Amino acid sequence: MVPLQSQVLLPERIAGLLGLSGTVGQIVGGLLGAFLIANLLLVQTAVAGPWAKRKITAAFTDRIAVNRIGPFGLLTIVTDAVRLLSKELIIPEDVDRPSYDLGPLLVPFSALLGFAVIPMGNGIHLADPETGLVFAFAASSIASLGIVMMGYGSNNKYSLLGGLRAIASNIAYEIPLVVTAASVVVFTGTLQMSEVVAQQAEPLLTVAGVTIPQWFAFVNPFAFVLFVIANLAEVGRNPFDVPEAPTEIVAGFQTEYSSVYFVLIYLGEFIHIFLGGALAATLFLGGPAGPILPGFIWFTIKIWAFYLFTQWARSAIPRLRVDQFLDVGWKGMLVLSFANLALTAIIVGVIA
Amino acid sequence: MSLEEPEPEDGAVEVLPTAGDEIAELLGDLVVDREEHVNAPGFVIRPDAVQETLTRLRDEAGFDHLSCVTAEEREDRYESIYHLTSFDDRQREVSVVVPAPKDNPVSESAEPVFRTADWHEREAYDLIGVEYDDHPDLRRILLPDTWQGHPLSENYDQDRPQIVTLSEWENPLAEDHREEEGDTMYVNIGPHHPATHGVLHVKTVLDGEQVADVDPDIGYLHRCEEQMCQTKTYRHQIMPYPDRWDYASSGLLNEWAYARAAEDLNDIDVPEYAQIIRTMGAEFCRIASHMLAVGTFALDVYGDFTAIFMYAMRDREKVQKVLEDLTGQRMMFNYFRLGGVVWDLPEPREEFFETIRDFLDDLPEALEEYHDLITSNEILQARTIDTGVLPPEVAKSYGATGPVARGSGIDYDLRRDDPYGYYDELEWDVITEDGCDNFSRLLVRLREVEESAKIIEQCVDLLEDWPEEERTIQSNVPRTLRPEDDTEIYRAVEAAKGELGIYIRADGTEKPGRFKIRSPCFSNLQTLPEMSAGEYIPDMVASLGSLDIVLGEVDR
């Protein structure tokens, strides 16, 4: 089997290729690596946002969607980008300036930050700290701060309600999310992402000559389901799109944003969906592992699969009411995730 | 009315005077004078005896439905007419006429007896200028608060400019700060909001996420429809306007409301063949309208970009195509004429029937899909069951009709209770649900689509076998209609949203002296505060969606 994870991280390899070493090599390699990864994601987001989302939704609703510009309407991405960026940036009266402006910046960059520790296969892995998993969750949580800043800074009551709902949803669903992730950590005994992925490459069992790897989605499917559901809430898609809820509170925290800020918020949302998919893939689906195709392709397929799932949910499932949403979080997900953690701990303790 | 129908109609007129005398006996010396309207006996009472009269009629004679309040200015007096009927027996009708002097047009409010009078009297005050004593909240309703004069009153000067500077307008944000220490928050929902289905402005006071108070503010789409109809001739010029009341594909149903009132006023018969075409067209409109209602309701509950809305639009589109074939138009049909319809079914007839049959064959499967996607979805049930509760007594008091009333278990449908067209010859059922909640109203609409399909199928069967030489689409109607002076009629039909009534007073000319539209959406929308007090915002939005209002009809 080809090793999924080269031991050399991306910055070091770039430094090596450039013939640099020492601190300079680290800095240049790190910057270039970060630039590369950020662009990889931004390109995927550009495809996902103006084009794939429309195509997928259209497929669910028996429509055709964008098909005028370029092959399959792909150049819509370009025209939409130009259109959105050339719109007037309307800043309402009496907004709370620093927070109104910083919010839209925090959202995409917090999500991008989370990708620093995600192993994407073929050596595309920016950093591999021992606390990788915690770092990813911590980074993605910064987005909540951005949303609160937007909700509060917009000087709009719908935004305020949206901001409050976003905080409530983050508290209610991040705990089950992290606790479920912790049940994986009970198996692995480490928070280091490369190690989590490496352990999942071990064979679980062999059926008729086909070796099934020890992906945690197979080992503990219950935890996987919990994680994916909590993740839906984390990225704010139906049935949990309560913080936005366009038909109730008119897109909540984004009501007052236009032009570039709007683009930033949308970028952030999509990168967040991808980060959610990346975490699910890394923790439960063997990271970049998969037969035949290179690791990075598999990784991309997995995060896109999660993206497709969010769009499916959005097309087919009604939105919960805000109190029901919190009930599901606190009374359902939290209890189940702790039960899962305790059971996993007991089983692992007994077996080990 | 078909050729056969005038007989029972005449019979009913013969019975009514006795009923009228009984009512007169019941009211005793409250009655100052008697009038005879085409549809009902009228009793003139003193302006300070409105509440007593209406209470007696409601409690002792079973007139529990204040269908409409019409106000008008006559040469020597102002007049408010309360059109009362009964939910149990729609054909029992009575008009209570309340004259008020010219110099001081004040009469007692009916609001304490019938809650629905609240908005109806506000409208009368706004447009005609009658003032109502004891009314809890006598403000303008359709026109801006700063409007000068009452447009439907006799001496209103249309040329006088209405110049109101912005600073004189009530500042909608001012209320925002009315209570510095309060825990509630004032939010303007609309007039531009994704869930208001048009230009409705809901002044909402929130306590956290819950609704403490709701005040719908209407009139943004007021187009003077009543006044426009008063300046047009009966024969041809009024018919295009009804299409523009409930413009969300209910055109033929609205046209029928005018056609019914005007035909009864002028004693015009409608050939049976035309009645069947009318019935079929009207039911197609009902299906289209309910599809839109279900689709947008799903939009309100599910959020944007969901499948159901598109599916509903897809099926509505098929109906639109049939209606386009039939009438030549997609929305503004203008297909009915007094005494019939404008033209026969499109040729080739077989192809037209084939299209309809294909649609009817596919419909059960489509409805099954809706039930899979919507009504059997547990999250949707959690969202809609026991939210937006409207108890039957409250619904009756507010004059709610249509699917809103039937979703509260009120067995009331004008197609059956006050038959017109060809409905009483066909096999179909009135749908009711006892849940009184948003879910019931949704179910009623979905099930009514099935009933409409049944009606259409029977109509198609009849039309297919109709002998070619007997296809009379219009009866012989004089070119100019001049109903006798002072004839008054109030007639209603079952539109997609409920009881759509028209009051016409003839003044001896070829144009109506007073043309009043009783819009079902107007009455239904009044129940919103009742349904949403104490509920969460999402439930208020869902309730608004379940009322299925079209602002063109609310504001007229």
Image: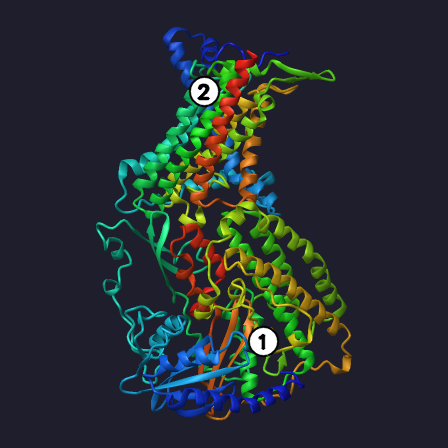
Picture coordinates of residue B237, whole percent (x, y): 52, 80
Residue B480 in the figure: left or right of residue B429: left
Q: Amino acid at mark 2?
A: Leu
Please indicate whether residue B338 sits to the left or right of residue B151 in the image. Answer: right
Percent x, y for residue B160? 29, 77
Return the mark for residue B417. 1
- Point out residue B76 in the picture as x, y percentages from the top left corner: 34, 91
Report the amino acid beneath label 1: Asp
Inter-mark Cα distance, 1 to 2: 69 Å
Q: Indicate the quadrant where residue B342 lies.
A: bottom right
Which numbered circle lies on residue A222? none
Q: Relative to residue B1, is residue B111 depicted above or below? A: above
Q: Is residue B348 visible?
A: no
| Quarter of the figure with the C terminus of chain B | bottom left
* Marks 1 and 2 close (CB-CB < 8 Å): no
Q: Is residue B142 left or right of residue B426?
A: left
Q: Describe the element under mark 2 as helix, strand or loop.
A: helix
Q: Nearer the viewer, residue A99 or A318?
A: A318
Where A158 falls versus A100 (above or below)? Answer: below
Residue at position x 65%, y 65% in the image: B451
Identify which residue, B464 or A209, lies in the foreground.
A209
Comparing labels 1 and 2, the label whose residue is closer to the camera: 1
Residue B246 seen in this snapshot: yes
Residue at which label 2 appears: A133
